[in-house]
Image (tube, grey):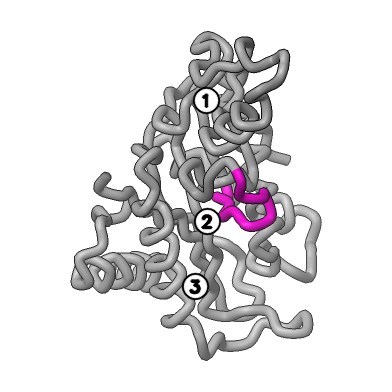
Amino acid sequence: MRVWVRSDMSLSYQSIISTALRALSIRADELDEEQSVRGIDALNELQIHALLEDAFIEDGFGVVRESHYPSDGDAYTTSSRRQRCDLVLMSDPKRSLIDPTYELKQLAMAQDTLFAESQSLHPDPTTTCPPEDAWWIEIKSCAQFAYRDGVPTPNPGYAHELVSGLQTDVCKLSADPHIWHAASLITLFCEDETIARHDLNQAASMCMDQDLPIQSPLIETHSITDRGGNGCVSIGLFPLSI
């Protein structure tokens, strides 16, 4: 069994992709040791989110799952109507993420009450992290051979899922003025590394052709046991040009 070794890294796009791939490769190897019928490519997207969350916590980063987009809504917008980001990372795990819309709501609620003077839009910088300092990551999972009813079969929507998911996430992240560090992270399961690098770069090129604010992806790969067509897991991290 492989042992997780905590890496001494600061938060960066390289540290993000390295942590993510290591988490997936360790889990893939564990499933091999267990002689599991299904491999890591059978995990659904939310299971992958949880796996990555644990990995970033192990590496000493602050992690928030399903955080509201900071500029989505106003003081009167209900939480259920606001968009959420899959994963928000902070360099200091002891800090809490500031939600400007929530702060405005609290301020509005305190008006004309005894607590009005105690409310502030300037939280303590030693214990909080403004959204501009956090790293906002949207995550998609895509497979060339996807599990349907427990059986891996060729995915007819593979190309569309890969490109459309990336386009959607880039548009959401780039639209928020409070987000200064952002990337779309794609977990890709496919036949081999050559296909992975080609398809991830092609997806980026198609976004660039549409003038979306995206940079060339960072790509890291790991071979996995082929149980039904996928012999490789890859992480494609697409930083935004914000």
Q: Are marks 3 and 2 in contact (CB under 8 Å)?
A: no
Q: Quadrant of residue 196?
A: bottom left
Q: Earlier in the sequence, mark 1 or mark 3?
A: 1
Q: Residue 7 bears which disc, if any?
A: 1
Q: Which mark is residue 139?
A: 2
Amino acid residing under circle 3:
Cys
Residue visible at 55% across and 28% down in the picture: 98
Which residue is painted at 43% across and 23% down in the image? Answer: 10
Find the distance from the CA under tag 1 to the CA under tag 3.
28 Å
Residue type at mark 1: give it.
Answer: Ser
Residue 168 part of the magenta segment: no
Q: Residue at x 69, y 55 (%)?
A: 80
Give the vertical position of 6 relative to 20 (above or below): above
Image quarter in which the C terminus is found: top left
Q: Nearer the viewer, residue 24 or 160?
A: 160
Say which residue label 3 marks: 190
Check contact, mark 2 vs mark 1: CB within 8 A.
no
N-term-proximal mark, 2 vs 1? 1
Range shown magenta: 76-86
Residue 83 painted magenta: yes
